[in-house]
Image (cartoon, grey):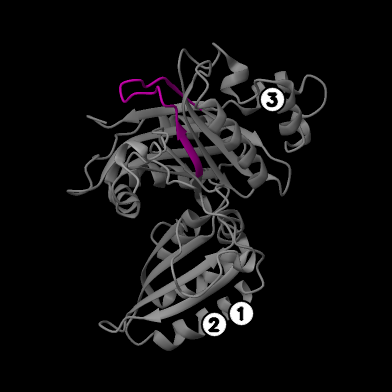
Amino acid sequence: MTTLSERPPARQVSQRVSQSAFDGAPLRVVLLVEVHDGAQQQFLETYERLCRHVASVPGHVGEQLCQSIENPSQWLITSEWESAPPFLDWVNSEEHVRMVRPLHSCVRDTRSLRFHVLREVGGGRPTAEVGRQRPPASPRTGDGVIRHALTFTVRPGSERAVAGILSDYAAPESRVDDTTRLVRTSLFLHGNRVVRAIEVRGDLLAALRHVAQQPEVRAVEEALNPHLEQYRDLDDPDSARVFFTRAALPAVHHVTAQDAGAGTAGERHALSYPARPGAGMRLAEVLARHDEAAADDPRSPVLRSTIFQRGDVVVRLIDVRGGLDADPARSFGLADTGRVAELTTLLDGAAAGEDGLGRLLALVRMESLTDRRSPGA
């Protein structure tokens, strides 16, 4: 019999805060749907068309459609993917936006949840089935904060007017309800691209709806309308939904260094990396791998890093100890020549060639328009 003293020591799990779409584990996607009364048949027909198409998408393993036994208006769609990246490529594509649009007229509400599969017990299916990869050995440690961003482009020549609008507006009420509050909002401009990053504690969807309903925010959005490259009508639910669906810039990776305490804020900066066409996901993964290593490096000035990616738009939001220029190579994720060479193969031609590092530093840095932390955050 093994005594307590003879047992092997418990594995030490890193306490650094992190999340990632690049763990390589199978992905389970859960979509909760509330269908309008009388629209069940339309919903079914639209879903079946979608299902036939998604079956041919690389990385898709299978799915189930379920209807509530208590409320026939409630439906549940679960899908399984080999890993997160192929799902994110699909769900963020223009093709997906176009295909789900017919659902809007028959669905009252939806909620999408994404989970890595860490353990699988029973069911009679082999773990390595259909190319499934090994789940992570241990779970990641979170901090209860959800990170999300929106991005859109404005008409060339309107950048300074847009900067003025976004730099000078009344902040919305941070408290959403008893369980949800806004933690921080940061706005950046890069060329004619705007990035709005938000941090939420609680329910992200509830926070987004809360912000959209605030008069001061609505006034800003209306003032932006004439400058947008993509038309939208905020009084038309379908137009607004399509715009914000395309604008969504999800966080695919986040890490907080172990020595970054709650009181260690650092300076906040955003970097927009110009990905080559089709290389956005790979570029985000390379940056994520760098940030994982840097989080354990006491020489790294980066306290926190969040990577947002949709298609070929890749944005890295960082909190830096001592300012961005104190150690720019490490702050930008370019601490060695090998890293520069690897990134250069994934960057648009404007950043490649001789002196690629110097040119990249000038190209990726975004202009900070505003950075607001909620009281007590």
Asked whether residue 211 appears in the rendered view, the answer is: yes
Instruction: Identify residue for label 2.
Output: 48
Instruction: Identify residue for label 1.
Output: 52
Q: Identify the image quadrant of residue 60.
A: bottom right
- Tell me which label, 2 or 3, sits earlier in the chain: 2
Residues packed near mark 3 inside 10 Å, few (<14), some (14 to 19) or many (20 plus): many
Which numbered mark, 1 or 3, is in the foreground of this view?
1
Asked if residue 141 is positioned above or below residue 262 in the image, the reply reads: below
Q: Secondary structure at mark 1?
A: helix
Instruction: Identify residue for label 3.
Output: 360
Q: Secondary structure at mark 2?
A: helix
Which residue type does callout 2 highlight? Answer: Glu
| Tag 1 and tag 2, C-beta contact below 8 Å | yes
- Looking at the image, residue 120 sits to the left or right of residue 272; the answer is left
> Residue 95, percent across and down?
62, 65
Q: For the image shown, how many numbered marks are present on the structure?
A: 3
Residue range corresponding to the magenta coloring? 252-269
Identified at 50% across, 27% down, the residue is 295
* Residue nearest the viewer, comparing 178 with 187: 178
Q: Secondary structure at mark 3?
A: helix
* Residue nearest the viewer, comparing 80 with 244: 80
Which residue type does callout 3 highlight? Answer: Leu
- Looking at the image, residue 16 sits to the left or right of residue 135; the answer is left
Determine if the magenta segment contains residue 353. no
Location of the C terminus (image quadrant): top left
Identified at 74% across, 26% down, the residue is 338
Asked whether residue 192 appears in the rendered view, the answer is: no
- Looking at the image, residue 158 sits to the left or right of residue 29; the answer is right
Which residue type does callout 1 highlight? Answer: Arg
Between the residue at mark 1 and the residue at mark 3, the CA separation in whole angstroms equals 43 Å
Residues packed near mark 1 inside 10 Å, few (<14), some (14 to 19) or many (20 plus): few
